[in-house]
């Protein structure tokens, strides 16, 4: 297991590929920023800059409409990731990214099945989700302050996530933990980052990569 930069990994894997990005709006957006700035700083925009083609799917109609009104060619569609077959997404994809989506779903297996139907042999999928056994969650649990996200309905550890992905027809390549970069974090955060680099099993986010055989 490694402790890797999530967005850098996604960007590297996306280069020149046809990419499907599930949960493409994400959650790190600031209403005080200009819409164009907000988009330019998003993971979806980073993928778009390097991919051969990218299609995004999200339920957040409001933000997708904001981007459209700003004249941004975002390649996003409004849709349910648990019913990807209802969307006209075209040919199979080379890479499918599901970024911190699975923990919100009532029927996450339906998303994995939909991803499989949109894959060809060799398609890589990358699934990220909060790590149920991270150091931060363990400390919060011990202190009686553990709190999941408002819309979270499940938590994964590494082996469970690997089993879940395998059950839906993919061959797991790796399960790592991920971080969001260290450029703008303070000293305390850098110290925690150094600890988790040494012990990646305590990282905050799981990053699983798998492929369709």
Image (cartoon, helix red, strand yellow):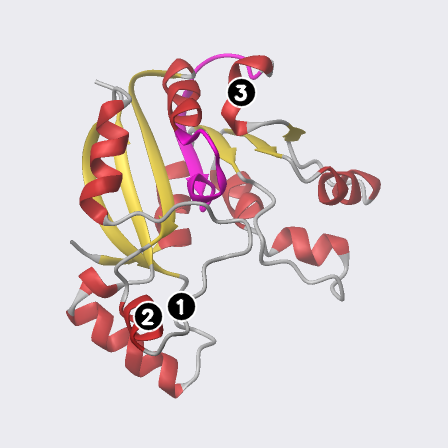
Query: Of tags 3 and 1, which is closer to the observer?
Result: 1
Crowdedness near tag 3: few (<14), some (14–19) or many (≥20) residues, C-alpha within 10 Å: few
- Whole-angstrom CA distance, mark 2 to mark 3, is 34 Å
Residue identifier under label 2:
141
Q: Position of residue 23 (x, y in %)?
A: 54, 39
Q: Residue at x 53, y 20 (%)?
A: 83
Q: Which residues are magenta?
A: 89-108
Q: Which disc is residue 186 wearing?
A: none
Mark 1 falls on what kind of element?
Answer: loop
Mark 3 falls on what kind of element?
Answer: helix
Residue identifier under label 1:
146
Q: Position of residue 188 (x, y in %)?
A: 37, 86
Q: Is residue 159 magenta?
A: no
Q: Is residue 95 magenta?
A: yes
Q: Residue at x 38, y 87 (%)?
A: 187
In the rendered view of the protein, which quadrant contains the C terminus? top left
Q: Which disc is residue 83 wearing?
A: 3
Q: Quadrant of residue 197?
A: bottom left
Q: Residue at x 19, y 60 (%)?
A: 201
Q: Nearest the camera: 144 or 157?
A: 144
- Whole-angstrom CA distance, mark 3 to mark 1, is 32 Å
Q: Are marks 1 and 2 in contact (CB under 8 Å)?
A: yes
Q: Are marks 2 and 3 in contact (CB under 8 Å)?
A: no
């Amino acid at each position: 297991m490694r402790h890797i930069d999530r967005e850098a990994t996604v960007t590297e894997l996306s280069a020149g590929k046809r990419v499907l990005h599930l949960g493409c709006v994400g959650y790190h957006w600031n209403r005080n920023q200009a819409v164009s700035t907000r988009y330019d700083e998003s993971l979806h925009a980073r993928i778009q800059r390097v991919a051969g083609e990218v299609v995004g799917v999200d339920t957040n109609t409001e933000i997708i409409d904001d981007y459209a009104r700003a004249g941004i060619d975002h390649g996003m569609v409004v849709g349910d990731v648990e019913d990807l077959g209802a969307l006209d997404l075209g040919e199979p994809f080379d890479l499918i990214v599901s970024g911190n989506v699975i923990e919100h779903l009532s029927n996450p297996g339906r998303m994995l099945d939909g991803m499989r139907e949109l894959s060809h042999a060799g398609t890589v999928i990358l699934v990220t989700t909060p790590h149920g056994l991270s150091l931060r969650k363990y400390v919060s649990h011990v202190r009686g302050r553990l709190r999941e996200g408002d819309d979270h309905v499940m938590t994964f550890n590494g082996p469970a996530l690997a089993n879940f992905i395998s059950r839906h027809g993919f061959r797991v390549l790796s399960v790592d933990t991920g971080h969001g970069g260290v450029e703008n974090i303070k000293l305390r955060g850098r110290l925690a980052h150094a600890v988790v680099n040494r012990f990646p099993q305590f990282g905050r986010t799981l990053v699983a990569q798998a492929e369709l055989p």
